[in-house]
Image: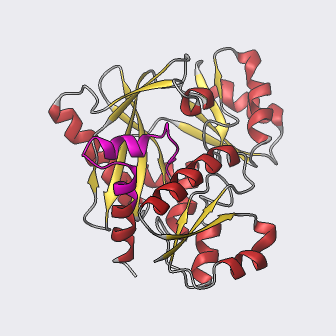
Amino acid sequence: MKIAVLYGGTSKEREVSLSTGEGMINALRQLGYDVVAIDFDPAKLTQHISELENVDFVLIGLHGKQGEDGRVQGFLELLGLPYLGSGVLASSLAMDKSRSKQIFANEGLPIARSQTFNKKMDVKEIYQQIINTFDCPFVIKPNQEGSTLGLTFVHHQEEIEKAIQLAFSHDDQLLVEDFVEGRELTVSVFGNQGEEEALPIIEIIPKNKYYDYEAKYSVGGSEHIVPAKIAEPLTDKIQSLAVKAHQALGCESYSRVDFILNEQDEPIILEVNTLPGMTPTSLYPDAAAAVGLNYEQMLDKLIGLAMKNY
């Protein structure tokens, strides 16, 4: 089978995507697939259409905008090419933190209190609404961005204006969210729609104060404890919430759901990642390893799962 890997891209997460793409390409070659590696650029669609001729299946190793947000998925669907992962709508909803939180709230899933602001609003008005609504510490982040890019943990009021400007440098909308103190957890979800199951919970212990970009992608930047040391009833609850969040957005094949377990042992859903990282330090491969699947076996299983839907 001839499989194309779209990786790289033009988003601010390009470096992460290059690493994900490299991991996918190497694994596919070890599995004996015929691989077409495409460093994806939206400005070169005509070239990419030519490169995708006679391809049987596509892996999307892109992260961030024009990768995770449904646009590439729509491009592949117009070409009639099967691919691994969520479709246009689910990808777009998961990328839009504000919209996904609304869906989670409607489904009764636990989320942190938040408020969304548009770039067209006056910064002074945004500032005033924030200080009237939120007590420090809280988080200001772009509404559609990944890998903690543009995110600020605000501890003092004098940090707010700079945090607003930073978030708006990444996106036209920002999200202000209560900071939840607790344990960083993530749950990988796997399976066809209606048959999804959660892999073992991973607890993330960052070497930095927060689980920031460096902690996520630097070798040794964080410790992954898998399975997380959590009592069985709570483990079952968190895994169930992960599957429900995945299903609420209409995700397909696989995703990764991030949580904070607060000091009262209440899990709070942060976001759903429809294209979880597949770098050497990524979490999804770690969860797969905990159930006896190495990187190559994990990828082969995901491809087989997705191909059944076409």
Which residue does the image show at 79% across and 26% down from the upper left?
162
Q: Image height check: is 174 above or below 25?
A: above
The picture places residue 266, in percent across and down from the top left corner, at 31, 30
Total number of numbered discs in the rendering: 0
The picture places residue 280, in percent across and down from the top left corner, at 50, 40
Is residue 295 rendered to the left or right of residue 274? Answer: left
Q: Image height check: is 225 above or below 24?
A: above
- In the rendered image, which quarter is residue 52 located in? bottom right
- Asked if residue 107 can be seen in this view, the reply is no
Is residue 295 rendered to the left or right of residue 279? Answer: left
The picture places residue 88, in percent across and down from the top left corner, at 55, 70
Nearest to the observer: residue 263 or residue 239: 239
Is residue 78 rendered to the left or right of residue 170? Answer: left
Which residue does the image show at 76% across and 33% down from the upper left?
164
Nearest to the observer: residue 74 or residue 180: 74
- In the rendered image, which quarter is residue 183 located in? top left
What residue occupies the far left of the structure in this picture?
A: 232
- Asked if residue 64 can be seen in this view, the reply is yes
Give the residues in magenta: 276-299
| Quadrant assignment for the N terminus | bottom left
In magenta segment, residue 147? no
Q: Image height check: is 98 above or below 191?
A: above
Nearest to the observer: residue 64 or residue 20: 20
Which residue does the image show at 42% across and 48% down from the upper left?
256
The picture places residue 77, in percent across and down from the top left corner, at 57, 80
- In the rendered image, which quarter is residue 218 located in? top right
Nearest to the observer: residue 200 or residue 166: 200
